[in-house]
Amino acid sequence: MNIALLLAPELPPSVVAILPFFLIIAVFYLLLIRPNQRKQKQWQEMLHNLHPGDRITTTGGMRGTILSIKEDAVQLRVPPDNIKMEVVKSAIASVTAHQEETK
């Protein structure tokens, strides 16, 4: 027997035939789209909370300390020679250590 007919016996067969497609769309949304949206929101929040003195890692693997923040870029100091470089904010993968706040 068809499981869809058992679950919804009063629906016409054409609607019952479409139900699996809606189920597949719902599963894709719950397993793929929604977690990516949550991850994107956390990344945007991390970029918004950057401060000078924070240590970051870029998507290219460079690590450095933020010297200044501009609208769409940050200026980094990269060891060992304390080279200053500018990186766009979208290239920041993670904050590895936050600035120690003085009290």
Image (cartoon, helix red, strand yellow):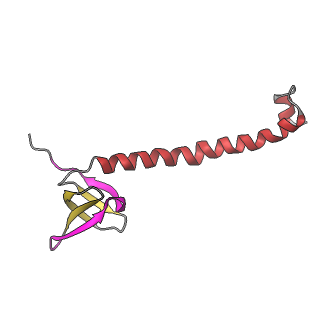
The residue lying at 54 percent from left, 43 percent from top is 34
Instruction: Say which quarter of the image contains residue 62.
Output: bottom left
Establish if 26 lies above or below 71: above
Region of the chain picked out in magenta, as a range: 80-100
Task: Residue 31 in the image: state x and y as whole percent.
Answer: 59, 45
Q: Residue furthest left?
A: 103
Task: Residue 97 in the image: state x and y as whole percent.
Answer: 24, 53
Magenta highlight on residue 89: yes
Left or right of residue 15, residue 49 in this image: left
The residue lying at 9 percent from left, 44 percent from top is 102
In which quadrant of the rendered image does the N terminus lie? top right
The residue lying at 32 percent from left, 59 percent from top is 89
Q: Residue furthest bottom?
A: 81
Establish if 78 lies above or below 97: below
In which quadrant of the rendered image does the C terminus lie? top left
Task: Residue 23 in the image: state x and y as whole percent.
Answer: 72, 40
Left or right of residue 11, residue 57 in this image: left
Instruction: Say which quarter of the image contains residue 2.
Output: top right
Establish if 27 lies above or below 95: above
Magenta highlight on residue 30: no
Task: Residue 15 in the image: state x and y as whole percent.
Answer: 83, 36
Q: Residue furthest front?
A: 71
Left or right of residue 81, residue 92 in this image: right
